[in-house]
Amino acid sequence: MNLDKVKKVLNEMLNKETVDGRKRNIVFWYDENAEFVEEIDELQFENAKVIKLTENNSFAIKYELEKVDTGSHYLIYSSSPKPVPRENWLLDILKYSQEFSTDKTTVIMRDLGVRDASLRDVFKKYIKFFNNKERYRKFVSYNIEKYTEDKVDIAVLSVLCRLQVPDLGSVVKVVLVEEAEGEKNKYLEAIERFGDPNAFWRLMKEVYGYNLEERSLEKLLLKPGRSIFQPANQKL
């Protein structure tokens, strides 16, 4: 995930002209769902320091900002929800500081150039998928021009099935071949862990006409009518 836009906004907040006689800028970022807890270490600023707020270091941070270093700009990051005022040891500092907020879904969609707000829930369900840099890079490499729900689902499935290009027919083939050859189906397991099995079976119904209530790869393979190996015409 490209954090350049997040860093740009934070840089602007940290380096903007101070007012009311203040000497520095302090920005609080309460990442209540801990979506950026792994990426925060990648954010470095030339003119500001980053401090991670935890359950046990509020007093230490307060002492640092008010006694030890009263001139530096600071980004204070917390992977927890913003505490209620009566439980917030840093409330007095927060009152004269700025707050930043974003979420990973928004960052991903901006990075990919997705402007269709109706796709927000589609990308949100794949946050765990996009948290892996290698999967993210592979998804980006598909160069999808116009995003739709089906295109996102198929692209995710294709990445998890280690395909060079996004193609539903190829997804089905590798999943079924893996099922026939081994005790464990690593592709199906990847879909269950990082993808959306519901999306897989929805596409089986819409594209291949699999209408059985039971989600069975064996029955999918033996389904009468259109061959499961017939090209699905679902390339992106």
Image (tube, grey):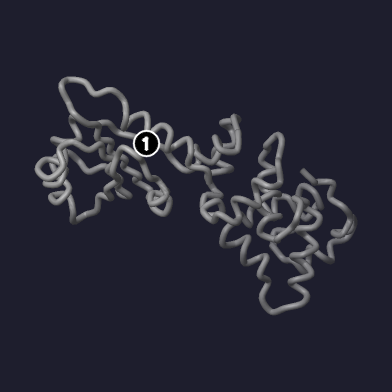
Residue at 13% from the left image edge and 50% from the top image edge: 59
Residue at the far front: name it: 46
Residue at 18% from the left image edge and 56% from the top image edge: 56
Q: Position of residue 24 (x, y in %)?
A: 22, 31
Q: Quadrant of the C terminus?
A: top right
- Secondary structure beneath disc 1? loop
Q: Is residue 148 left or right of residue 75?
A: right
Residue at 28% from the left image edge and 36% from the top image edge: 27
- Work out whether residue 101 or residue 178 is closer to the camera in this orientation and state it: 101
Q: Amino acid at mark 1?
A: Ser
- Work out whether residue 65 or residue 154 is closer to the camera in this orientation and state it: 65
Label 1 Cα crowd, 10 Å radius (few <14 / some 14-19 / many 20+): few
Q: Position of residue 93 (x, y in %)?
A: 16, 36
| Residue denoted by label 1 | 101
- Work out whether residue 116 or residue 109 is closer to the camera in this orientation and state it: 109
Q: Is residue 139 left or right of residue 78?
A: right
Q: Is residue 19 left or right of residue 3?
A: left
Q: Is residue 92 left or right of residue 233?
A: left
Q: Could you tell me how many numbered marks the image carries? A: 1
Residue at the far bottom: name it: 183
Q: Position of residue 43 (x, y in %)?
A: 40, 45
Q: Quadrant of residue 196?
A: bottom right
Residue at the far left: name it: 67
Q: Say above or below: 32 vs 21.
A: below
Residue at 77% from the left image edge and 67% from the top image edge: 176
Q: Quadrant of residue 150?
A: top right
Q: Position of residue 142 (x, y in %)?
A: 71, 46
